[in-house]
Image (cartoon, helix red, strand yellow):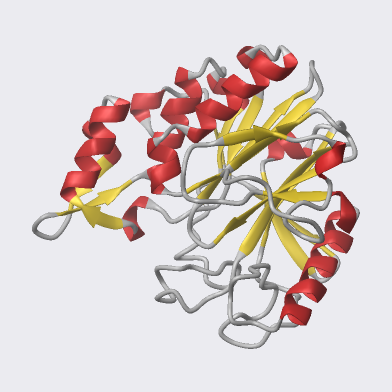
Amino acid sequence: MQYPFLGTRINHGYVCRAAGGTAFFAAEALNQKNGVSHGFSTRLGGVSSAPYDSLNLGWSRPDPTENVARNFQIFCDAAQIERESMVIVNYEHGGTVLKVTGGDRGRGFDREPLAFCDGLVTNDENVVLITSHADCGAFFLYDPVKRAVGLAHAGWKGTLARIGARAVELMQKEYGSDPKDILVSTGPCICKNCFEVDLELAERFADEFGTKSLYEHGREGKARLDLEAAAAIQILDAGVKPENLTLMHACTYELDTYFFSHRRDKGDTGSMAAYICLK
């Protein structure tokens, strides 16, 4: 999938990295950097039963907590991260991004959750940022100059609220990051062909991001909306260089072998997790 209206220097695609009996989707541009580790989990290699089979990482699902805990240990072992180092967003499908430090390790896991937020940034090498997903997209951010990272969960509400751009802005404010230095990738998400919404919502996106190319008319009163293109526009608007942006183009709805999908599975499904950390 290409977006002529965004220009031609953006990177496209993903790598699928097998590890520890499971696999992670990643951006090659970030995967090649020695100073950062990141990935978006798949449903492979866990212990949960159908319809949460098998690496369900969603605590809110009706899946025994011991299964989810075991799945998170599989996730950590495969990603080579310490379980106690993780901090997870307390998402509300909004646009709030928070700075976290080593003092927040374990928040949302073995400790109290953070305040409501859908995005996190840090420059602490002892912290792993975590977000949850079941069709909603992700933003991975890495500043190799100021040594900082960011991660955001982006459903349609967060995308419309420009949560990716807000993460860039918070990295500027907290760490002195220059957007031109930041590498950004989207994560897997439901694609335009599979994401039908009310036409009114699609038009709100067109107004916010300045192009009707974000949607195509579908059934009467409906449209197919492209969240990934909206993600790209906000990142470029925030000052990130096109050549520093990767769009994965991995559809959670279509790639059922790898991903849970809230829409495809009519809400009765598991959850993936994304992570990023300095190393």
Establish if 65 lies above or below 122.
below
Residue at position x 45%, y 35% in the image? 231
Quadrant where the C terminus sits is top right
Q: Quadrant of the N terminus?
A: top left
Can the viewer see residue 158? yes
Residue 2 seen from this side: no
Question: Which residue is more in the foreground, 123 or 76?
Answer: 123
Question: Which residue is rendered at x = 29% and y = 38% of the image?
Answer: 214
At x 48% / y 37%, what residue is drawn? 95
Residue 108 position in % (x across, y down): 72, 56
Q: Is residue 189 left or right of residue 43?
A: left
Q: Residue at x 84, y 60 (%)?
A: 76
- Seen in the image, is 118 located left or right of residue 227? right
Q: Depth check: give the residue in front, 13 or 262.
A: 262
Q: Position of residue 206 (x, y in %)?
A: 25, 33
Quarter assignment of residue 237: top left
Quadrant assignment, res 205: top left
Where does the image place residue 55, in percent across and percent down from the top left?
70, 73
Q: Is residue 143 above or below residue 278?
A: above
150 in relation to 146, above or below: below
Asked if residue 66 is positioned above or below residue 43 in the image, the reply reads: below
Q: Residue furthest left?
A: 220
Percent of width and height locating residue 250: 53, 53
